[in-house]
Image (cartoon, coloured by chain):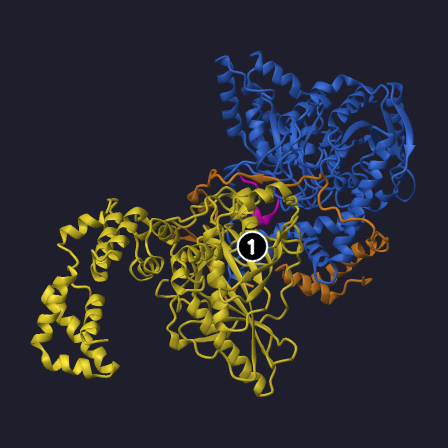
Chain colours: A orange, B blue, C yellow
Amino acid sequence: MSAKISRDEVAHVARLALLELSDEELDRFTAQLAAVLEHAQDVAALDLAALEPMAHPFPLRNVFRPDEVGPTVDRDEVLAQAPAAEDGRFRVPAILGEEP
Amino acid sequence: MSLVPTARDHATAIAADVRAGRRRAVDVVEAHLAAIAATEDQVHAFNLVTAERALAAAAEIDRRVGEGDDPGPLAGVPVALKDNLCTRGVATTCSSRILAGWEPPYDATVVRRLDRAGAVVIGKTNLDEFAMGSSTENSAFGATRNPHDPARVPGGSSGGSAAAVAAGFAPLALGSDTGGSIRQPAALCGVVGVKPTYGRVSRYGLVAFASSLDQIGPFSATVGDAAICYDAIAGHDPLDATSIPTPLESVAAHLADGVSGLRIGLVREMLEGDLAPEPDVVRRVTAAAEALEAAGAKIDEVSVPAVVYGLSAYYLIAPAEASSNLARFDGVRFGLRVDAPTTAEMMRATRTEGFGAEVKRRIMLGTYALSAGYYDAFYGQAQRVRTLISNEFAAAYERFDLLLGPTSPCVAFPLDAKTADPMTMYLNDVYTIPSNLSGQPAMSVPFGTGEGDLPVGVQLLAPALEEARMFAAAAVLEEAAP
Amino acid sequence: MTTTDAVPAAEVAPSIAPGWELVVGLEVHAELATATKMFSSAPNGFAAEPNTNIDPTSLGLPGSLPVVNGRAVELAVRVGLALGCEVRSSIFARKNYFYPDMPKDYQISQYDRPINEGGRLELPGGKVIGVTRAHLEEDTGKNSHMGGDGRITGADYSLIDYNRAGVPLLEIVSEPDISTVEEARQYVEELRAILVAIGASDGKMEEGSLRVDANVSVRRPGEPLGTRCEIKNVNSLRSLGRAIEYEASRQIDLLTAGERVRQETRHWDETGGRTRTGRVKEDAEDYRYFAEPDLVPLDPDPAWIAGIREAMPLLPRQRRERLASAAGVEPSLGAVAVAVTRGLDELALAAIEAGADGRRTLTHVEHNLAVDGAAQLAPSRFAELLAMEQSGALTSTQAREVLGAMVDAALDGRDGDPAAIAEARGFRAMDGDELAGQLDALIAAHPDEWGRFCGGDPKERGKLTGFFVGQVMKATRGQADGKVVTKLLIERAGG
């Protein structure tokens, strides 16, 4: 695992997360994130290969719901909270890219 | 100059009086609204006080009592809700600009259960933006002040809820706890704060921060009040797939159980060495141990070495899950939108303007921890640390029934004292994080004061689903508190 | 088969240039036939108005949580068993990316541990195509691009409907075992038939409940696999074939000219008849998959799986074999496949069991029952009709007409009695002697033609047979059976 997160890497994850950073922010965040990851080196150094990763604290399995229609939400109530709506649908600016 | 009232109106007493027709719910609510009006401008516990709704709900309770109806075990009790709990038709902002003014079209399950129990929602409380923080200074709407000393923080992220109870604005409040966000502010504000077993309280309607760590829990001035609140909100919910199906055992029914014969372990790593708290805090934890011993418990020391890795694991797992949970804030369906010619640009501009610095930091940290090439070393490794910590707790609970330690390393600190360096702030959660990682219950109980007469809280930790035992010990501590 | 799918024989030309091999893998997304969505109880089905089949979870509202639809899991297991997969413990994972038709800006899918792995699908011709996996995931909403030229790149703005968001999908991925366009079509047709037969999906490509993406590459025989391109936006079986052919040619042209094939996603342009490159992205998409923390693992109980296996409806292959066996024909006979595809095999079986001739039954199903209402025919009535034809009481032409009337009646919910219908139309197959008499009269009336018939070569005879049959039909007002007339002609001519 690399010891320090680089400015380029921070810029990359900002892009992935759709966040625009100024140069000053990029510098500041790089230093701050590096500090956190530096601290996390203690965990990186541990030999935990024998352990399973824990995704859930409680060992539940097979939780289902029946295939029965339940309450829906009122479209007007939802669209009233939308930034823009038209013809019962959510309106957004031009979408240029195809779905990944 | 303390803003903490000398006299308190406890939930248990209010509910009993209102149900019996000895007091009117409307009078109770009005009294609390008056308390809010008196000092809220100095405390800033609330993002929104829902006075009209509260009075209308209270009037309805009184009407039902008049007709011989029983409104429930929390009849007429004002409750403040952390502003990351969805309340239908009432602004739910998570103290973020990206959700300013958003009114959900549905209620969180806990809100519906409080309503069924007869409680009256009196307002939505301030928090660190999206529950990310330990001081409530990350709120986009201004910090909350600690009622014990308004120049100091109330803790976080549920600072508003803790302060509301401490200031007498409501006998009960709900918060959420992902890494300590109920317990730490409870300790700093001198009130009781409970994080239930993961899955014991439904998360449906809680705006998610870290899905595998978040839990909703009560704040109150007394252990008894926390107990009746917990009983009202806990229990299986089919709308939350991580909700535990085991039938709920009432904790209120076990409050007087005492601690005779219970084996209680003082966690060494939380009291000595690198993670040791301030000396005042250590003293109070020691005193608490003595009080439990005097009540018949057997005290001993226990080592849980892996807790020292909790902070690192947490700051890889929580931001990772958060980075995904917060992706939905994109300006398309709700909340803030910053216009742009294309949707991609609109999303970027909206998120850039709408999120505060701490939220951005965690989103980026989380994105990094999950990204190709780093997943195994970071997120994967952190999930193994979780297993390690859980295994060590399991070993400890073979010899002990409960564990005891500090809640916070220090008493309430001044505003802006820890904002310069994120790591400094993160260190506030070292004792609370391990039980989020293991999914086990824990609570903070006020136990004396420390430097500057500021409150100190001690933390009880229990195995999964053993809240009743934990509350019983808390009741003993409350009785013995200096 | 519907006409959009029927491909004239002339179009099934050799797929690609000689000296090259085509390698195709298909990814099929099937919408599962459940009442509610994959992770919430919002309705799954037709909605007249946009954004009415929604709830907090399918809209991804803050605070909402997913809960797995048990019926979707059951259908996924059914499909897995039907494809011979191993059904295993599985978990859900988040696939993270931003796109406005995705309410949470992540999709809940399955990545590391899918519910079904390692199956196979046998094409009617016998070739086996491997199935890598079949996993559960949720569908997205729908964008409509407004203004401009209506296509995505020229649009002014977009409108989004989330009715489809959250609908359960089963993604079925094949191994790259498909080597021809025809195999690709057969794979999709057989897979669809299986999905429909077991009630997992209604499998309609035109309606979007079955979507196919093709991974296409080419190589010289003996060489390792070439770079593949994913082709999306294929909306019919016909387009699938055209798209694969086009893409193969495109790649061969590139490689022949010494260039490389770039690995990318391309879109099939139906009107232009070509694939086009998708938008080129700077960063490769990093989906940052991790186990879905809001859901717990699926651990299907072996007894439960066994129960599903036992209750499984017959698969198309099994139905073809059953019908072929009863009719005394080969399962690969086209009419058998048609009967099963149309869902009329039970009808045909019942008729055969009542004594009808197998081949004749199949012929009627193939040629005369490609219509609505056919499925509502009462098997006993169908059998009676066939018996009437078989006994000579009706000519085949008459039988077809009566059958048509029976289907119309069935559509109206009425019982169609073939005997009564025949009577009402005055149908009555001619008596053999009467027919012979008619024929002899006509032979006498056309001596030239008769002479040419007797002395003519087979081609000449064929033409004149038509002449005489036509004359007999005219004379009897269509009540003669053409086949019987032909037979008599031959007899009269002395063989």
Residue at 88% across / 30% down in the picture?
A: B399
Q: Is residue C160 visible?
A: no
Which residue lies most toward the front here?
A: C494
Q: Quadrant of residue C489?
A: bottom left
Q: Quadrant of the C terminus of chain A?
A: bottom right
Q: Quadrant of the N terminus of chain A?
A: bottom right
Element class at badge 1: loop
Left/right placement of residue C41 relative to residue C289 reads left
Left/right placement of residue B209 relative to residue B427 reads left
Please, which chain is the residue tagged with disc 1 on? B
B223 drawn magenta = no
- Range of the magenta residues? B91-101
Residues B434 and A66: in front is A66
Residue at 86% across / 22% down in the picture?
A: B292
Q: Which residue is mark 1?
A: B330
- Up/down of C454 relative to C195, above or below: below
